[in-house]
Image (spheres, rainbow, N blue to C red):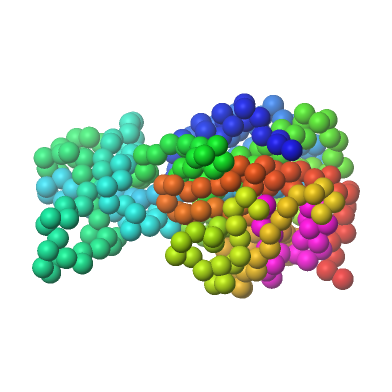
Amino acid sequence: MSVITPKSEEFLQRYLNNASPTGFEAEGQKLWLDYIKPYVGEWQTDNYGTAYGIINPGKDYRVVIEGHADEISWFVNYISDDGFLSVIRNGGSDHLIAPSKRVNIHTADRIVKGVFGWPAIHTRQGDDANLTPKVENIFIDVGAKDKAEVLEMGIHVGCVITYEDEMTILNDRYYVGRALDNRIGGFCVAEVARLLHENKIELPFSLYIVNSVQEEVGLRGAEMIAQTIKPNIAIVTDVTHDTHTPLLSAKKHGDVRGGMGPSVTYAPAVHNKLLKLIIETAAEKDIPIQREAASRRTGTDTDAFAYSNGGVPSALISLPLRYMHTTVEMAHKDDVNNVIRLIYETLLKIEHSHNFKYF
C-alpha cells in the first residue's frame, strides 16, 4: 500500500533540489513549512531555524516525530591570488568525490557557479602518479582571472558551497540525489502529518512534527528544540547504510538492504518499551522492518532527544540509503513509504500519558 501521492512526490523533488546547507537552512525550511501548514494547527521556528508544526496543540502530553533538514556542504576558506578557492568542510563532506563536481557558491545576493577542478590524468606522472584528493588540495575554479575578480563576484571567505545536483528516479524504484540525508526524513514526517489530517485522526496528545537544523555538526538543532518542546516521547527518523553494495561489509556495518523495509536500532539511547511498541506495530500492520545495533551512540538526533530534560523515551526508525554523503544517495521508494507508514501507525498506538517508565 503506497501512501505517497503524486503531489507529495512533486514536493519531495522541489524540497530535495533546494539547497539547505548546515547553518543556512532557511530556504528549505520555508518550503517545508509551506507544505505542512494545511495539516497542522500551529507552526513555529526557533532562533537557529528548526521548524515545527503542532497537531492538537495545548495538551500536557507531547510527542515529537523528527527528521533533520540540513545537508553537508563546504565553506570558502581561502582565495588565492590566481582566483582559486580552497575549502573546509561544513559537516561530513567527502573530499574524495569532490573533483569534477559542479558547485553553487552562495553569496549575499546570488549563486555563483563553479567547479571542483583536478589535474588531468596525463599530467599525473612520476611523483604525482598517486595524487589523491585531500581537503588540503581540492580547489574550486569559478573562471576568474584573479582574486580581485572573485571578490567582485561577491565571493568571500565564509561563503557556503553546495553541489549542483537534482533528484532523479532510477529504474522507477529509487529516489536518487544529494541531501536525501536527511531531508527525506523531513519529507516522511511531513507525510505523516498529511495522513493524520486527511484521515481526520484525533490524537489524545499534542504532536510536534519537527525538522531540525545542524544535525550534521553535532545534533545541535535537536539539542536546542528538545529543551524548547520538552517532549514526553520522541520518534526520530534518519538514514542508515544499505550495506549490500560493493566495498561494504554487512558483518561490520550491519545487515541492512534497500527495499526490505525501515531499520530499527538497538542502542542505549533507544528506549526499550518504545522500541517494543514500534516492532509490535510493524508486525500487526505487516510493515517489513530490519534491525541493527549501535555501539555507544546512534549518531543521530535520537541521542539529543533521549538525553535531554532528564531523559526522554526515544526511538530511531532509519531509512536504508546507498552512497551516503555523496551526490547520488539512493533510497528505495518502498522503504520511504514504509517509514511513513510505521511512524503513522505507531502514533495511533500511543495513548494519552502512555507509561514508558523503564520498569
Residue at left 78%, top 35%? 196
Give residue 203's position: percent from left, percent from top.
84, 40
The answer to which image quadrant residue 251 occupies is bottom right
Compared across the picture, whether 18 is left or right of 183 comes to: left
Could one spot residue 46 in this view of the protein?
Answer: no
Compared across the picture, whether 295 is left or right of 217 comes to: right
Give residue 193's position: percent from left, percent from top.
72, 36
Residue 265 counted in the magenta span: yes
Give residue 320's position: percent from left, percent from top.
59, 54
Compared across the picture, whether 29 is left or right of 140 comes to: right
Q: Residue furthest front?
A: 171
Residue 268 counted in the magenta span: yes
Could one spot residue 121 in this view of the protein?
Answer: yes
Comparing 141 with 62, the one in front is 141
Quadrant, the C terminus: bottom right
Residue at left 28%, top 62%? 134
Residue at left 57%, top 41%? 173
Residue at left 19%, top 35%? 152
The answer to which image quadrant residue 309 occupies is bottom right
Residue stretch rendered in magenta on the structure: 261-282
Quadrant, the N terminus: top right
Give residue 110's position: percent from left, percent from top.
33, 31
